[in-house]
Image (cartoon, rainbow, N blue to C red):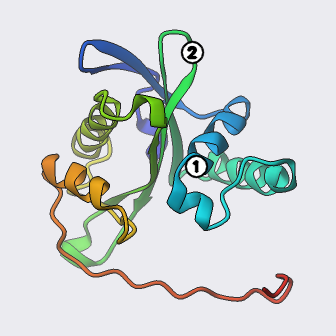
């Protein structure tokens, strides 16, 4: 399904090119750094430390092995990871059986924000949804506190059309806090 994406590919972010490619296990530390560099994610426990390494490695392995999922990284000309996002193809019954492309965990390195990388990545996502995946709907959720991200997505043509709900499940083997 999602393996039909033609990768790697170079996309233009303002006047520089970034390479968009599938993440590999070698990218794990860079992806975790991007997640933990974000104050909201860090507040939810995304931290770049040794204690969390096994959990992140297991998640990456699961995502890479799932044909409905793709973890994407954007790298600069020196090969450094400057952005990431996860894509999930969701077949659906609603909208006459339409497929949805879900975008999650969009992050750009704090030193590279406002450089056009995020816009280039999201334009690429929308193009892939239409051309490669034949998914007529690209959807994402964004934490209510991410006001700048909301403006960013609106500028790209995304519409805040729904209200999302979450329920945190306490797993039997999780430590209580």
Asked where in the image residue 16 lies, by quadrant, the reply is top left
Query: Disc 2 marks which residue?
Result: 79
* Residue 106, numbered circle: none
Give the mark count: 2
Image quarter in which the C terminus is found? bottom right
Question: Looking at the picture, does residue 27 appear above or below residue 99?
Answer: above
Image quadrant of residue 161? Answer: bottom left
Q: Which residue is mark 1?
A: 35
> Could you give the CA–CA distance between mark 2 and mark 1, rounded to whole angstroms?
18 Å
Could you say which is closer to the camera, residue 116 or residue 67?
116
* Residue depicted at x 31% and y 27%: 115
Of 26 and 113, nearer the camera is 113
Task: Look at 62% across and 50% down and name the residue there.
Answer: 36
Percent of width and height locating residue 130: 21, 44
Decide: few, some or many residues near mark 2? Use Cα within 10 Å; few <14, some 14-19, many ≥20.
few
Which mark is nearer the camera, 2 or 1?
1
Q: Residue at x 48, y 17 (%)?
A: 76
Q: Position of residue 148 (x, y in %)?
A: 28, 54
């Amino acid at each position: 399904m999602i393996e039909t994406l033609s990768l790697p590919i170079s996309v233009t972010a303002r006047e520089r090119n970034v390479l968009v490619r599938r993440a590999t296990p070698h990218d794990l530390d860079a992806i975790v750094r991007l997640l933990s560099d974000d104050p909201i994610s860090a507040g939810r426990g995304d931290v770049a430390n040794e204690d969390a390494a096994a959990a992140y490695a297991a998640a990456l392995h699961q995502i890479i092995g799932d044909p409905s999922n793709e973890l994407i990284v954007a790298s600069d000309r020196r090969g450094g990871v400057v952005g990431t996002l996860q894509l999930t193809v969701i077949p659906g019954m609603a909208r006459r059986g339409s497929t949805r492309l879900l975008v999650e965990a969009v992050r750009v390195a704090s030193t590279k924000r406002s450089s056009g990388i995020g816009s280039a990545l999201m334009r690429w996502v929308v193009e892939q949804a239409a051309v490669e995946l034949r998914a007529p709907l690209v959807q994402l959720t964004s934490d209510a506190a991410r006001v700048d991200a909301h403006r960013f997505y609106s500028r790209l043509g995304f519409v805040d059309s729904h209200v999302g709900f979450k329920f945190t499940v306490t797993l039997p083997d999780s430590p209580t806090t």
